[in-house]
Image (cartoon, rainbow, N blue to C red):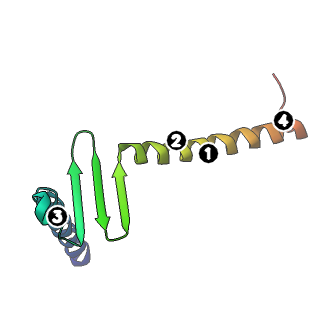
Amino acid sequence: MKKIKFVTIFFVCFMIVGYGFIEISSGLPDFIKNRSWVKVSFKEDPFDLKFDIGNYIIYINSDAFRNISDNTIGKIKNTVDNSILHDFIKGEIRNP
């Protein structure tokens, strides 16, 4: 039970520190961001989070979540459709 409490407290503290870092970094003026190695941009509505780290830029936004869900649901749907079609062709599923 102590381990669960420790993990929960650690997770909550990590989330608070992470959110604070994102809020403070995204609120800095441009002249400070331009000199920084890590640049963070954050908007809540619509959700848009961008990390600019040297030569790399990481985007996390609502379109990314939509693409992930569409791809995942699409793959599951295709797998189920192909499985049902395969079973129907083999004669394991009878047409009512």
Q: Provide the residue designation for mark 3.
A: 33
- Whether residue 48 is visible, yes or no, is yes
Quarter of the picture containing the C terminus is: top right
- Residue type, mark 4 in image: Phe
Residue 58 image offset from top left, x and y in percent: 36, 60
Q: Quadrant of the N terminus?
A: bottom left
> Quick one: 72 or 89, which is closer to the camera?
72
Identify which residue is drawn at 32% across, 71% down. 54
Residue behind mark 2:
70
Numbered badge on residue 88: 4
Which one is closest to the eye, mark 4 or mark 2? Answer: 2
Instruction: Tell me whether circle 3 and circle 4 mark residues in contact (CB < 8 Å).
Output: no
Name above or below for residue 5 compared with residue 59: below
- Side of 31 where 56 appears, left or right: right
Left or right for 26, reference 80: left
> Residue sitting at 28 percent across and 44 percent down?
47
Neighbours of disc 4 within 10 Å: few (<14), some (14-19), many (20+): few
Q: Amino acid at mark 3?
A: Lys
Between label 1 and label 2, give the one nearer the viewer. Answer: 2
